[in-house]
Image (cartoon, helix red, strand yellow):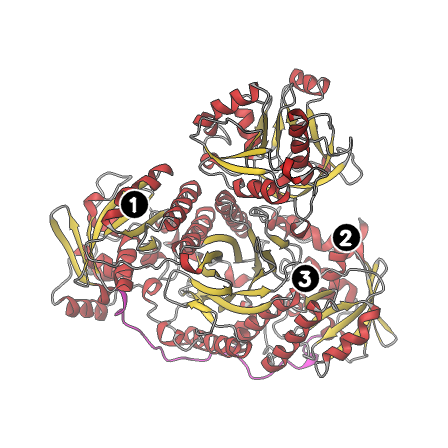
């Protein structure tokens, strides 16, 4: 901190003068430094949602299956017969941009604690990641570090990392996005609340000792833009210890099983301050904390440091005095510290003691619920336009086969095997589908049912049109689930944006929330909670607005699902949906013409819903043998990916159009490629009744051949496409750049 | 599931050791309990009694966080003395992944682990060639059979000195090797750089077996295959044969 400057303490802690006045008014006096430090955290953007709260209230959060919506540690969705799924996504962008390994590792640690804080056993993680171009050494360093960090923490915990996504765009060069989602399984009767109730009950601090690591994580790091001082912020990044967290997980679930807990809350952003005040708030109570009892890992820590430390692997538990010994015994079994650091009161205040001395006394409501909110005047950025680009904006390249190879080696399309092979994606042995497909599917042991999970984000499309982009992202997540045969049920979201105090960013945020709301309503997938990450800017330049959606769906029978691989030669290849592909915002536009411009096509949510219903029925009735969403790289890349996955080529004939390149590589939400056995074709077409579905070719052979009318557009050996797609990421990570079409032809 | 009466299978008792940081304990428990019908129970790492058990499983995971070296701390857990006595008395002990690493550190199996040659964690299906079927853990497989079982580890690069390797070869203690689809123990089929593509070894007596791949993960075709069942079936058959 900039000690010795003339700036007032509140400003150095990230508070505005008006906010300071507000705090004084609520306390009826000036806060002391301990109180100020606590307020600065609780009223930070990260904890207080100052710019997002007024808009987030609009999102649909209700539904018959929602057992717990936003506000708790994780959303909880009923899946029938007494079981429920807990889900939550969060960002760890800024820590990862500074220290990729620990930033990503502690991101996993934090989200996993959120899941077992509600009493659920974590069963999967998914990690959507966004970096700058791999041509730059720093970006390769970030990618390697983040992937290794996710692997180190998740693998050690024994929680499979089963999905996610990776995008590379210059926009994330100085501000990578590391979002982490965790999903858990919980019986209805085992659900825990993060509340402190019952006067005289005990507040236990369980797990790691408290140190100076991560001081100011929420206020200094997560709630401000990056500038040249970013390197100096390294000490605000925490260090992870997955082994302790694994023990913490087992100990907490054992205490849950033995009914020892009144409430449980993890210590994350804001440390003890945030956890204690939130537990008191949820329980309608107060808490007295004695920081002299907190086990420390460093000498000479100031009281305020103990209150705001973000040391990892700690939980706060509320228990009765009768259970004090039992709690200590369970924790001792797992070699964990468990210390009574406070008591529940009935006075609605968070009081902080240092031994006998009262060093802080604040109303819980002021800390938790009364952070000021801000509404900014939105300003539509100049690059947004109402018009699609004219089709003749770019010339049609002469060799569309070369374009396909280029796109298949693009870092945004090529195989992610290099990444997911570093994650233990199989532990717990529930994977009915392995990574690399549309969505992950986990069977539930002892049931027929399965859970399908996916994450989706597309900042580039949201940059061109945040409302359409957000609608498209939700629709795509649902389409991914429908492609494996799962019914979309609920979402969690991680909203990654720039500095909301700027009108342009506020506009993007407002529009994206509106788009998300429309799509969630239309598709019947309520929001169970999530996270807002603002200030993703460096040197005044914001990232693409990027609402990342984590969606959960259900399959009635985990053995009746489909993947995207072509299954047999001689099957019909069909195109489902009638959307018109456009070059605007496509990977084709970026990779081949080096531009991001225009306006993306809108998703027709009503048609989308009907189309997905048909898709699921076709899978359940075993009429569709494979299904693959047409997304990045358009129809041609979609076909190529299914062909590679199945090891079977295809012959495709399309109608003659003036711009076959846009038909092949353009993008529009709402298209799916299916395959079906010849014998089932008639039944499938009949089932479609009104939903656009037409045959475009047949599987078979060792080539991907596409014609339009009498013209051959693409005719390539599948082996060549596969080689390009499979080896590209590894080559780029090694710093060799993507393999070029010429190199590939010579192999 | 087995060609043996379920009532007999039920009499075979497995113990799955839980160290702090074990994370494949439940998977191993399920593989035995659900897919063979034998009895499986958990053992806490501070237990010192293994009476009445037929086979002890040291499961995969990160015992003690793999801090210092995988297995280096777990070998000092109280149960390991009991496991040593159990093995010396002829009891069957199988160490999977981290369990294999613990057996190496405890000196119950020869050799040591380096970090993977690629210096990265690797999780994928690999092909294994079964080299020795005349031991209790592999009797259900054919000699030279190729099976598909996943690996998931950071330190699986098996090493042993020249004399040690010669002894392993002479005494037929190399139980499984990484191989390609046609059964060749080729370099490109080796996921971690292990010496001689070694994926699993046993002690001289053949009653202690350690392997890096996870047979417990492939006991159900719904989640990726059933090639791992043979290990657990083999153990049950061997135990029942000795009982009769």
Could you say which disc has been placed on residue A744 in the image? 2
Which is closer to the viewer, label 1 or label 3? 3
Which residue is depicted at the point 27% across and 65% down?
Answer: A368
Q: In the structure shown, which secondary structural element does the residue marked by tag 3 occupy?
A: loop
Label whose residue precedes the other's in the sequence (2 or 3): 3
Residue A666 image position (x, y, % from top left): 68, 73
The stretch in magenta equals: A368-395
User: How busy is the neighbourhood of tag 2: few (under 14 within 10 Å), some, or many (20 plus)?
Assistant: few
The answer to whether residue A713 shows anywhere in this view is no
Which is closer to the viewer, label 1 or label 2? 1
Is the Cβ of the residue at disc 1 closer than 8 Å to that at disc 3?
A: no
Could you say which disc has been placed on residue A560 in the image? 3
Q: In front: A356, or A36?
A: A356
The Cα–Cα distance between marks 1 and 2, rounded to whole angstroms, is: 52 Å
Q: In the structure shown, which secondary structural element does the residue marked by tag 2 occupy?
A: helix
Query: Furthest-right residue in view?
Result: A710
User: How busy is the neighbourhood of tag 3: few (under 14 within 10 Å), some, or many (20 plus)?
Assistant: some
B87 lies left or right of A338: right
B99 lies left or right of A738: left
Which is closer to the viewer, label 2 or label 3? 3
């Amino acid at each position: 901190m900039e000690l010795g400057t003339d700036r007032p303490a509140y400003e150095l802690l990230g508070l505005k003068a008006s906010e300071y006045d507000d705090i004084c008014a609520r306390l009826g006096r000036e806060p002391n430094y301990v109180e100020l430090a606590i307020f600065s955290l609780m009223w930070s953007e990260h904890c207080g949602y100052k710019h997002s709260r007024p808009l987030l209230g609009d999102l649909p959060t209700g539904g018959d299956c929602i057992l717990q919506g936003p506000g708790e540690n994780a959303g909880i969705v009923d899946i029938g017969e007494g079981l429920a799924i807990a889900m939550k996504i969060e960002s760890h962008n800024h820590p990862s941009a500074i220290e990729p390994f620990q930033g990503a590792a502690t991101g996993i640690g934090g989200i996993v604690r959120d899941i077992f804080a509600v009493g659920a056993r974590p069963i999967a993680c998914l990690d959507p990641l966004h970096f700058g171009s791999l041509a730059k050494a720093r970006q390769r360093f970030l990618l390697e570090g983040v992937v290794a960090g996710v692997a180190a923490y998740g693998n050690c915990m024994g929680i499979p990392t089963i999905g996610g996504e990776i995008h590379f765009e210059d926009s994330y060069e100085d501000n990578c996005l590391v979002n982490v989602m965790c999903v858990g399984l919980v019986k209805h009767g085992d659900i825990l609340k993060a509340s402190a109730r019952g006067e005289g009950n005990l507040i236990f601090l369980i797990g790691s000792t408290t140190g100076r690591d991560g001081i100011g994580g929420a206020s200094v790091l997560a709630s401000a833009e990056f500038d040249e001082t970013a390197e100096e912020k390294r000490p605000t990044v925490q260090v992870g210890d997955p082994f302790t967290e694994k023990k913490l997980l087992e100990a907490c679930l054992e205490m849950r099983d033995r009914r020892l807990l009144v409430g449980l809350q993890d210590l994350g952003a804001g440390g003890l301050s945030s956890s204690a005040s939130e537990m008191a708030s949820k329980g309608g109570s107060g808490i007295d904390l004695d920081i002299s009892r907190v086990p420390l890992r460093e000498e000479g820590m100031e009281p305020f440091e103990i209150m705001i430390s973000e040391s990892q692997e700690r939980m706060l538990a509320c228990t009765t005095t009768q259970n004090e010994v039992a709690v200590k015994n369970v924790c001792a079994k797992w070699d964990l510290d468990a210390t009574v650091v406070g008591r529940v009161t009935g006075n609605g205040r968070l009081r902080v003691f240092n031994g006998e001395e009262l060093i802080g006394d604040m109303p819980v409501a002021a800390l938790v619920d009364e952070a000021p909110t801000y509404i900014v005047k939105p300003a539509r950025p100049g690059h947004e336009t109402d018009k699609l680009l004219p089709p003749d904006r770019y010339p049609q390249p002469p060799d569309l086969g070369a374009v396909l190879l280029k796109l298949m080696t693009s870092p945004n399309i090529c195989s992610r095997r290099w990444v997911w092979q570093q994650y233990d994606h199989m532990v717990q042995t529930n994977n009915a589908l392995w990574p690399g497909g549309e969505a992950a599917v986990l069977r539930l042991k002892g049931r027929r049912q399965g859970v399908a999970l996916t994450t989706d984000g597309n900042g580039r499309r949201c940059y061109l049109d945040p409302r359409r982009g957000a609608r498209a992202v939700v629709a795509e997540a649902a389409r991914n689930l429908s492609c494996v045969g799962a019914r979309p049920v609920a979402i969690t979201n991680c909203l990654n944006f720039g500095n909301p105090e700027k009108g342009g960013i506020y506009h993007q945020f407002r529009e994206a929330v509106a788009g998300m709301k429309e799509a969630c309503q239309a598709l019947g997938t309520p929001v169970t909670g999530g996270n807002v990450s603002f200030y993703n800017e460096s040197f005044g330049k914001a990232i693409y607005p990027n609402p990342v959606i984590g969606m959960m769906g259900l399959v009635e029978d985990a053995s009746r699902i489909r993947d995207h691989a072509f299954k047999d030669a001689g099957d019909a290849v069909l195109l489902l949906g009638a959307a018109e592909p456009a070059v605007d915002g496509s990977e084709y536009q970026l990779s081949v013409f080096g531009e991001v411009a225009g306006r993306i096509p809108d998703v027709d949510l009503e048609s989308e819903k009907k189309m997905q219903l048909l898709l699921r029925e076709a899978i359940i009735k075993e009429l569709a043998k494979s299904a693959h969403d047409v997304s990045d790289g358009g129809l041609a890349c979609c076909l190529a990916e299914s062909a590679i996955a199945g090891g079977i080529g295809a012959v495709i004939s399309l109608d003659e159009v003036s711009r076959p390149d846009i038909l092949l590589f353009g993008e529009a939400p709402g298209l799916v490629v299916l395959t079906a056995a010849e014998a089932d074709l008639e039944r499938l077409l009949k089932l479609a009744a009104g939903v656009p579905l037409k045959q475009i070719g047949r599987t078979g052979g060792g080539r991907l051949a596409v014609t339009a009318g009498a013209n051959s557009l693409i005719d390539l050996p599948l082996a060549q496409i596969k080689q390009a797609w499979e080896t590209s990421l590894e080559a780029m990570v090694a710093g060799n750049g993507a393999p070029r079409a010429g190199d590939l032809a010579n192999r | 599931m087995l060609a043996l009466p379920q009532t007999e299978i039920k009499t075979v008792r497995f113990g799955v050791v839980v160290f702090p940081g074990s994370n494949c304990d439940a998977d191993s428990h399920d593989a035995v309990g659900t897919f063979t019908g034998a009895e499986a129970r958990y053992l806490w790492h501070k237990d010192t009694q293994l009476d009445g058990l037929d086979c002890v499983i040291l499961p995969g995971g990160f015992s003690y966080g793999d801090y210092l070296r995988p297995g280096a701390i777990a070998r000092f857990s109280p149960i390991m003395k009991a496991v040593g006595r159990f093995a010396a008395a002829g009891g069957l002990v199988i160490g999977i992944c981290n369990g294999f690493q613990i057996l190496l550190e405890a000196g119950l199996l020869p050799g040591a682990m380096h970090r993977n040659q690629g210096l990265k964690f690797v999780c994928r299906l690999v092909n294994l060639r079964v080299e020795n079927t005349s031991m209790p853990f592999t009797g259900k497989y054919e000699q030279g059979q190729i099976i598909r079982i996943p690996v998931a580890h950071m330190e699986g690069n098996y090493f042993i000195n020249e004399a040690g390797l010669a002894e392993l070869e002479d005494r037929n203690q190399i139980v499984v090797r990484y191989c390609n689809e046609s059964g060749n123990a080729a370099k490109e089929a080796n996921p971690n750089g292990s010496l001689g593509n070694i994926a699993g070894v046993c002690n001289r007596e053949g009653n202690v077996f350690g392997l890096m791949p996870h047979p417990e993960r492939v006991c159900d075709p719904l989640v990726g295959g059933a090639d791992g069942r043979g290990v657990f079936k083999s153990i049950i058959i061997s135990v029942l044969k000795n009982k009769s």
